[in-house]
Image (cartoon, rainbow, N blue to C red):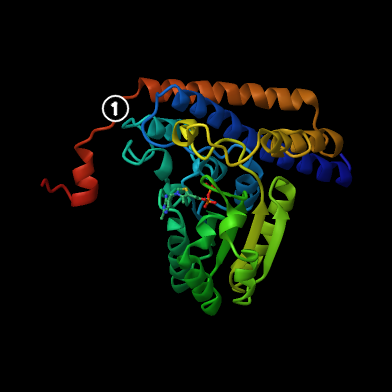
Amino acid sequence: MTELSNVDEQRRADWLALYERMLLIRRAEERVGKVAQAGGMPGGVHLYIGQEASGVGVCSVLEDSDYITSTHRGHGHFLAKGGDIAAMFAELWGKRTGICKGMGGSMHVADVSKGILGANGIVGGGIAIAAGAALGIKTGKEDKVSVCLFGDGAANQGVLMESLNMSAVWKLPVIWVLENNGLSEFTITDKVTAGEQIDRARAVGMPAVSVDGNDVIAVQEAMQEAVDRARAGEGPSFIETKTYRIRGHLEAEDAFLGGYSYRTQEEIDAWKAPDKDPILRFATRLLAEGGASQADLDEIEERIAQQVDAAEKFAEESEDADPELIYDITFDGQRP
Ligand SMILES: Cc1ncc(C[n+]2csc(CCOP(=O)(O)OP(=O)(O)O)c2C)c(N)n1
């Protein structure tokens, strides 16, 4: 093989891995959505469908030892960072084999062994955690970075300014990733936001870029630069990934809204089209420039279908979570 074909082969493998991770998130969440809509899952379920390129591009340049903090829409981040699909399904299904023993549910999937410090039902809850993790890395002189994934609704929480400021003052190894899907629950973010959120990072003198969040390679490249900077001791960076949430805010959205709609079907359909959807777009590029064949993509689809089926079976067949465990976790075993 010539040197050039080695490079091409490496790119083909790398790109196929990105594609597979995005498709895993999509197919996993389609299954979760189906079960949740049929009433088979406890608690609120917020899907990441449409935003896969953001989480996958971000996590593709991280090691297991690097940290991420996530949001209430955290399944995609969990899987992108290498979390186990069966343990995640069991958690969502409320089973004791779940990644948090069924105590956390959809909004609290976490796996510290993979650096996943947790999804969070508190909007903006991951922001100070990410800053704290970065401070721990710095004071412990560890070769790690901390990444905070948060939404444009969370960006309006005051804790963001405090954390951006301190991370810049102390040159913390943290990357702030604003996943800007333009929506905050049932509100158009522009209606409750003054100026551009990215300018809040620029105000504290931090490098800040805005990228097409539905282009996994654009996200990966911006992220690689930011991670290199953080590892070199040059401090924090801010990346805005512009994307779109295709599903409702949560799977029970219709029941919440009772006929009210905050966006049009045309808008949603436009983001599902092959030129916008992050997975369809990347499939086209893989076939045209990445050296992949349709057979490669079909094989991935088949592999993922088996993984999703197996994860669902595992979750369904597992024992329900033990409610008594709540006392051990939250009250050190004490009973009221
Ligand atoms: C502290 C707090 N306030 C309000 C809520 C209710 N809430 C849930 S999601 C959400 C909007 C989040 O928007 P964004 O951060 O953009 O994330 P997205 O849902 O778009 O992924 C709100 C206000 C909450 N969970 N926590």
Residue 147 visible to the viewer: no
Of the pair 168 and 194, the residue shown nearer to us? 194
Q: Is residue 53 left or right of residue 307?
A: right
Q: Label 1: state its secondary structure.
A: loop
- Farthest left residue? 336
Q: Within 10 angstroms of label 1, few (less than 14), some, or many (20 or more) residues?
A: some
Residue 278 visible to the viewer: yes
Q: Is residue 319 left or right of residue 238?
A: left
- Farthest bottom residue? 169
Give the residue at x 64% y 60%.
239
**Residue 134: percent from left, percent from top:** 48, 66
**Residue 235: percent from left, percent from top:** 59, 72
Q: From the image, which quarter does the N terminus lie in?
A: top right
Q: Quick check: 63 above or below 53?
A: below
**Residue 245: percent from left, percent from top:** 61, 41
Which amino acid, mark 1?
A: Asp
Give the residue at x 46% y 70%.
135
Q: Quick check: 300 above or below 136?
A: above
Give the residue at x 45% y 66%.
159
Q: Residue 271's image quarter?
A: top right
**Residue 280: percent from left, percent from top:** 74, 33
Of the pair 244 and 141, the residue shown nearer to us? 244
Q: Is residue 114 left or right of residue 91?
A: right
Q: Residue 198's image quarter?
A: bottom right
Of the pair 319 and 9, the residue shown nearer to us? 319
Give the total of numbered labels.
1
Q: Quick check: 316 above or below 147?
A: above
Give the residue at x 39% y 34%.
91
The residue pinned by badge 1 equals: 320
